[in-house]
Amino acid sequence: MSFWSPRVALILALGLAATACSSALEELPDDTGEARDAIQDGYLDDGDRAVVGIYNDEIGAICTGSLIAPNVVLTARHCVSDMANERDGQITCRSTKFTDTHLARRIFVTTDAEIGRSSRYYGGSEIVLLPGTEADSFCGNDQAILILDELIPESEAVPLVPRVDVPLKRGEEYYAIGFGATNDLSTGAGLRRRRDNLFIDCVADGCPASVVKPTEWVGDTGICEGDSGGPSLDLMHRVIGVTSRGAEGCEYPIYGYVYGWAEWIKEATLHAADLGGYTAPRWATGFPTDPIYSAELGGACEQPEQCSTNACLDGYCTRPCTEIATCPSGYSCNDELGFCAKLPEPPPEDGGEG
């Protein structure tokens, strides 16, 4: 099976050679694509603003990324690095390597639904690469983090949560978002699109070892050129994959496995929070990513189904808890039940004379 080259795909996505670019704002085309359905067979997406468009001014190329903290964008390494040893534009796991990393200050991201001249851009300040002696091998290592030079306000885009604490299973449903083309001819790149009702084909060691590494997984279909670096998300809207490569015809998409590089993602996010001067997201310090652990509690109920958590205790809605996922004020974690329980009301003060 042959796979399209991300680098060739990126440059073709805007129809620009790498040397044709001098400025992200000067060289972006007026018309970045037709309003056609895609990712492939998807739909235009104005709402998922934390899925950001990336313009790399150094090579004149577009990618996609996930805003996972106010100044942190998770994307594919081939969006920020050169590559060597491609064969006729194809990725070969035995030999394709990453080489020079691009300048962070020449990479720009936007939360707008279109990568164009009028879009609002945020610049990069630092690129964080995967650790290890084999990190320059393409397959299994196609993830990178771009730290921005300013914070994106939550009023503009609420950061996504990466699923760093729960492994994937074959057959799980997911959806994918990207700014890529609608076909192999690079038609329609530059507009954010989403495709739903996709299913995981295989995960890590359950995939063919010749083309998929333990830190990758294989999805359904519909990922095209320019979607590189974009997220796949589970039905709880957590990022589970980073688009890496795929076969011709926008088939057989291979994703970088977020869970497989969980510790690196958390460490890089903590570093970015220090740089940005804000409190790191709770998932970066071990808090569960399942939104049930952050659900509101205390509402009146008679049956579990009346609660968003499907948990009704003594007439009020509650949620599960752990040593890390603690309960709010007025509640304590009932170790036997594993749920937050209301603390008893303090006895009234004795107003009588002693």
Image (cartoon, rainbow, N blue to C red):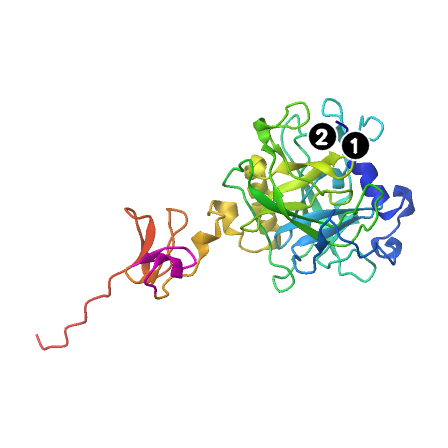
Q: Which of 125 and 64 is in front in this view?
A: 64
Q: Do the residues labelled 1 and 2 touch (CB within 8 Å)?
A: yes
Instruction: Name which quarter of the figure residue 328 lies in.
Output: bottom left
Residue 86 visible, this orientation? yes
Residue furthest left as drawn = 354
Residue 289 point in image, percent of width and height: 50, 48
Residue 49: mark: none
Give the residue type that dot 1 points to: Met
Identity of the residue drawn at 82% across and 51% down: 188
Residue 58 visible, this orientation? no
Question: Is 308 drawn above or below residue 168 in the view shown?
Answer: below
Residue 315 point in image, percent of width and height: 30, 63
Identity of the residue drawn at 79% across and 52% down: 190
Report crowding for label 1: few under 14, some 14 to 19, many 20 or more residues within 10 A (C-alpha): many
Q: Magenta-highlighted stretch: main secondary structure?
A: loop
Q: Nearer the viewer, residue 233 or 35?
A: 35
Mark 2 highlights which residue? 138
Task: Describe the element under mark 1 as helix, strand or loop.
Answer: strand
Residue 307 is a magenta residue:
yes
Identity of the residue drawn at 37% across and 50% down: 321
**Magenta stretch bounds:** 301-313
Residue furthest right as drawn = 20
Q: Which of 88 and 260 is in front in this view?
A: 88
Q: In this view, does 86 lie to the left or right of 354?
A: right
Instruction: Name which quarter of the figure residue 295 lies in.
Output: bottom left
Residue 29 point in image, percent of width and height: 87, 55
